[in-house]
Every structure is written in structure tokens, then in C-alpha cells.
Image (cartoon, rainbow, N blue to C red):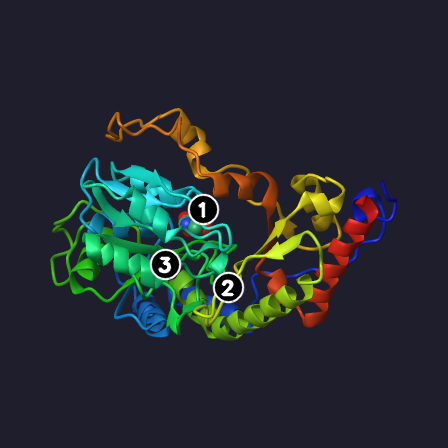
Amino acid sequence: MSQDLAINGGPKTISKTFNWPIYDEQEVNAVAAIVQSGKWGNPDCGDEVEKFEKEFAAYCGSKYAITCVNGSVSLRLALIACGVKPGDEVIVPPYTFITTASSVIECNCVPVFVDIDPDTYNISPAAIEAAITDRTKVIIPVHFGGLSCDMDAIMEIANRHGLKVIEDAAHGHGAEYKGKKLGSIGHVGSFSFQSSKNLTSGEGGIVITDDDELYAMMHSLRNVGRIEGGQWYDHYNPGCNYRITQMQAVLLSAQLKRLEEQTKKRNENGLYLNELLTNVKGITPLSRSEYITLHCYHIYIFKYDAEHFGGLPKNEFAEMLAAEGVPSFRGYPHPLYKQPLFQNKNWMCYAIPETADYSQTFCPVAEQACATDAVWILQHAMLGEKEDMEGFVRAILKIQEAVS
Ligand SMILES: *Cc1c(COP(=O)(O)O)cnc(C)c1O
């Protein structure tokens, strides 16, 4: 194989490093000021957390926002507030991060995996409809990579069946569907601020909603079951301490100021990369409908066809691409239902019904995405310049030439 490939010691196509997170003295000064104030958290916490929650809710066009420790607990808060009971079913996609489904287990409920659409890698509305039973209570669509799900179709199905929709928007900060911010369309929107995400404070999460009752319950569950206006040592609901610190809140407020511009930049780069890749055989970007008014490209995903790369397996291609200096990755190795958690049924203290059995679960599109098709370019690379997008394509063509 070609000595010219970076993986074999040849020169890298891209020598630049793509930094993340992006910050300057605004973040440093904001955190330093909190440290020096001595007001780091609850009680006596000052009001930076509430201030950020108001900013984020306003940014998303939602009435309320409630921060919490991460984007997994945020899903749990949303599920409990939606009123799930032990044994209820929650419809989730299999092509997502584990906690989209494990948060369901933590509520003693049954994740029901339905397949994704081959053109978008988002949960298929037709497959949702087919999976609904009289135990179904909630649908969790994941806006995978920051590409919006078909929310009109999903909300129509949910409303017709009386189901709640929790948008897992952990990849979707700032992205839009028909001009609406992701997370603001379903009953609850859930976000992560973990360090890889498009808005980050290292760790953290948030839920947004327009619903007064869901707000009050999620706020209580986040704060050890306390209620607004209640006494400090009076606890009404089975929550926990999921609060964030003031340092995280000021970091998030500073990062939020950068989000819209960063999102637009990724969106433009994504559109440009789509255009450049139309001429590359064996590489097909996921499709975006005209309803995607803003895509935040937490992950830029394309489908790889080994036939046009001399039969080179996807995982080897992805390693070569990363070696060429493109921040990229093969993505999930398996659909979620293949995880030992689901195959071995190690439910521990959780009361999951015997009927929950994943040994026969098979979602062909998700299987193919994991095994042979999906390649991810990561969000910080999508903050590069136009010439970087051209470099990504040069790297792909270099590999193609070397292996064909
Ligand atoms: C990151 C992520 C989460 C979990 O967020 P954490 O803050 O890491 O707990 C949930 N869902 C999806 C789709 C994610 O990518």
C-alpha cells in the first residue's frame, strides 16, 4: 500500500490542529470573578445559574430552562416528569449514545428500539408508529449529529396517541427545524454540555419546556425534591441533587455568546462540503431536507461505500482519514441493543419486565451504519475554513487513489 499515506509515514494532508473548546479572557475572567466572590454554589448561590437558564430558554424560544449535572440526568428528569411508571415503554433509536436508552432503564421502563432512516440516520416516523403499544408513554427522538428529526411527523403521531416527546438534543444546540430551535418543539428538550458538545462547560446539562407542570416537576427533581417557595429541609418528590455550580453557569453564559456564529459557520462549511463531495464516488453525505433551516453539524456524517475504495473496510478507511489530519472517526461500533447491558439483562435493582428481550432485536439500517457505512467528521473540524473543507476532500481522494 502507498507509502504516501500518512498512516504509512507519508505527509499528512492537513497539518493544522482544530481547537476545542474556543475561549478567551472573557471565559477566564468570568470564572475568576466567581472564584473570588466565594459564591460557588448552593446555598447562598448568587444568581448566575438562573441567569444562564433564562438566557438559554430565550435563545431556544422556550418558556423555561433547568440546568443539571449532565445530558444523561436531564433525560431522566424529563422522563420522570412525563409521568412514566414501571414497565412503561419508551421508543428510542438504536443509533445514539447509551444514555438515550439507559436513562429509560433507570426509570424502570423498557426502551423499545426502532430503526433509523437510511438517508438521515434519524429515527423513522413510520417505524415509531409501528412500535406503539398500549404501554408506550414517551418517544425520544435524537437529532443525530445535529440534523433535525422529522418533527412534524413525530409530533403528529405523539399527539394522536397521547404520548409525550422528549427531544434528545445533546447534538443539537442552536440547530433549527423550520426556523425553530431544536429542543423547543417537543414537550421537553434535553441538552448536554459535556466537553465534546457544541456548547460546553466541561460537564453539564439542561432541559427546556413550555409546560408549567413539567417545569415545576423537573425543577423539583433537580433540587432534591424541594419545591419553589418551600422550606430548605422540606422534600416533596423523589429527586436528587443534580445542581450545577456558578462557575459552570458563567462559563456557559460566555460560551452561549459564541454559539450562533459558530453554528452558522458549521452550517456553511457543511453545505460546502456536501457540494464538494457530490463529485466523489463512494462518498454520500446524509441528506438534509429544506426543513433544516440551520444544521449545527455536531457530527458531519457521510456514508462510505467500500466498492469505490478497492474493498477497503470502513474502519481502516476511517483510521487512514484520521491519520491524514481530518478529525474523524468510525462512530458507534454497534447499535445500542447489542450492548452487554441489553443482551445480558443485568438489570440490577431496576424492575424491568421479563418481556424485555433484545436477543432478537435487529434494526438493519442502524446495523449497516455501524458496520460498513457511517463515517463521522467532528464538530470542531467543521469550525475550520473553506480551504479546510477542501483539504478534507483531498484527503479522501488521496486514500481513494492509493487503495484503488
Ligand atoms: C452526550 C450525549 C448524551 C449524554 O450527555 P452527557 O452530558 O455526556 O451525560 C445523551 N444523548 C446523546 C445523543 C449524547 O450524544
Q: Where is mark 1, residue-wise?
A: 96
Q: Name the amino acid type tagged 3.
A: Thr
125 relative position to 254: left or right = left
**Visible residue check, residue 25:** yes
Tell me which amino acid carries mark 2: Arg
Select label 3 or label 2 by which is in front.
2
Tag in front: 1 or 3: 1
Q: Position of residue 223 (x, y in %)?
A: 23, 53
Q: CA distance from mark 2 to mark 1?
A: 19 Å
Residue positioned most to the right: 3
Measure the alpha-carbon separation of dots 3 and 2: 37 Å
Q: Nearer the viewer, mark 2 or mark 1?
A: 2
Residue 6, given in percent of the width and then of the height, sits at 80, 48
For the residue marked with disc 1, what is the amino acid? Thr
Q: Which residue is mark 3?
A: 245
Name the disc covering residue 187, or none: none
Question: Disc 2 marks which residue?
Answer: 288
Query: Which of pointers 3 and 2 lies earlier in the amino acid sequence?
Result: 3
Q: Quadrant of the N terminus?
A: top right
Dot 2 falls on a residue whose secondary structure is loop
- The verdict on label 1 being within 8 Å of ligand 1 is yes
Foreground: 178 or 281?
A: 281
